[in-house]
Image (spheres, grey):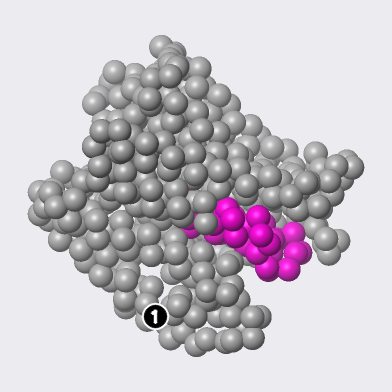
Amino acid sequence: MVTCPITGIEIRAETGRTVFEGGFRPFFLLAGLYAAVSIIAWVPLVHGHYLIETALPLPYWHGHEMVFGFGAAALAGFLLTAVPNWTGGGPVRGWRLALLASVWLLGRIAAWISGASALPFAVIDLAFLPLLTALIAPGIIVRNARRNGVFVVLLALLWAANAAVHLDALGVIVAARWGLGLGIAILLVAISVIGGRVVPAFTIGGMRMAGTPVAIVPRPHLDMVAIASVAGTGLLEAAGAPDSAVGAMAALAASANAIRLAGWQGWRTFRVPLVWVLHVGYAWLVAGFALKALAAFELVPANAALHALTAGAAGTMILAIMTRASLGHTGRPLRANLATTISYLLVTLGAAMRVAGAFFDGTLGQELVGFSGMTWAAGFLVFTAAYAPILLGRRIDGRPG
C-alpha cells in the first residue's frame, strides 16, 4: 500500500485490475502524464538543445502528438465513461480496455522512435481510433444515434485527419498541415458540443451543492448556431476558403459562443473551482475564435489564436472534465482540493503566457514560450500526481467501476 504525498490517498495492491475497470482511469492518467512529459521534452527540443529523429518534421510532430496523442486519449476517456451512461450499456473494461490503452501507448512510443520508419508508426497509430469506435459505436447507433451519433462521425473525421498526416510522412501526399488543422477543428467541435452539455449542467449542480443555486435557461437555437459556426470555421479552413470567409465565420463563432457562455453565469461560480474552471475553459474557446477572426485579417499573429484554442480551450476543458469525472466516478465528493486548484491556475497561466509570446519577437518571445510550456506542463504534472491514487485506487463507496 502506497500513500500519495500530495493527497494522502492510499493506493492498494489490487490497482492493476482496478485501473481497467473504467475507461476514464487509464486514459485520464495517460493523458495527464503525456501532456506534461511531451511539453517538458518539447521546450528544450524546439530550442535546439537536443534532437530526435521522427517520421514528421518537428513542428508537425509536436502538433500531432498533442492532437492525436494527448487529445485523443482524453476524448477516449470521456467517451468510454459517458457512452455507458448515455446508452444504459455496460462499460468497456478488462482486457478490451487494456488492449485499447496498449495500442495508444504503442503509438506514442512509435512517435518518438519512428525516425525513417514512417510505415510502422502509421499502422500502429491509425489502429487506435477505429478500435475505440468499434467499442463505443454499436451502443450509440442502436440506442441514441440521433443525440450522440455526432461523436461517431467526429471519431471518423479525426481518424481521416490523422491518416492525412501519416500519408504526408509516407510521401504519398502533402497534407500534414491540413490534417493537423482538421484534427484541431474536430477537437474544438467536440468541446463546443460537450461544453454545451456539461457547463450548464455542472454549474446548476455545483452551485446548488454550494448553497447558491442558479437557474440557466436552455437556448437550443443559440446552441445550434454556436456549434455550427465552430464546425463551419474548421470546414472553411479545410476547404481552403478565402481568409475573409474564415474570419467572418470565426467572428460568428466567437460571438455566438460568447452569448452562450454569458447565459451560463460564470461570474457566480468563483467560489467553486470545479465549476469556474469550466467557464474559464469555454472562455478560452471564445477568445481563440475572436483572435482567429482578427488573424484572418492579419491584425494579430495566427499563432496567438492557435494556442488560445489548443493550450487554452482544449487544455483547460480537458483538465476540467478529467478532474470532475475522476472524482465523481470514484464516489468522491465533488470538491476541488488545493492541488486541483493549483493545476487549474498553472494550465491557465501557461496558456496565457503562450498566447502572449506570439506577440513578441526575439528573446522575450522565446522566453515566454519556454516559461509557458513549463508552466502548462507543471499543471498537468500536479494533476497526475494528485489524481494517480484516485485513478488507480478503488471507488471509496464500494461500487464497481
Q: Is residue 194 visible?
A: yes
Amino acid type for the residue under numbered disc 1: Gly
Q: Give coordinates of residue 275: x percent, y percent.
A: 55, 70
| 93 displayed left or right of 176 | right
User: Is residue 355 placed above or below 374 in the rendered structure?
Assistant: below
Asked if residue 324 is among those painted magenta in the image, a careful observer would answer yes
Mark 1 Cα shell of 10 Å, populated few (<14), some (14-19), many (≥20): some
Q: Give coordinates of residue 63: x percent, y percent.
A: 38, 35
What are the residue bounds of the magenta stretch?
315-344
**Residue projecting furthest to the top:** 116
Q: How many marks?
A: 1
User: Is residue 146 placed above or below 222 in the rendered structure?
Assistant: above
Asked if residue 130 is among those painted magenta in the image, a careful observer would answer no
Q: Give coordinates of residue 53: x percent, y percent.
A: 43, 15
Dot 1 falls on a residue whose secondary structure is: helix
| 149 displayed left or right of 397 | left
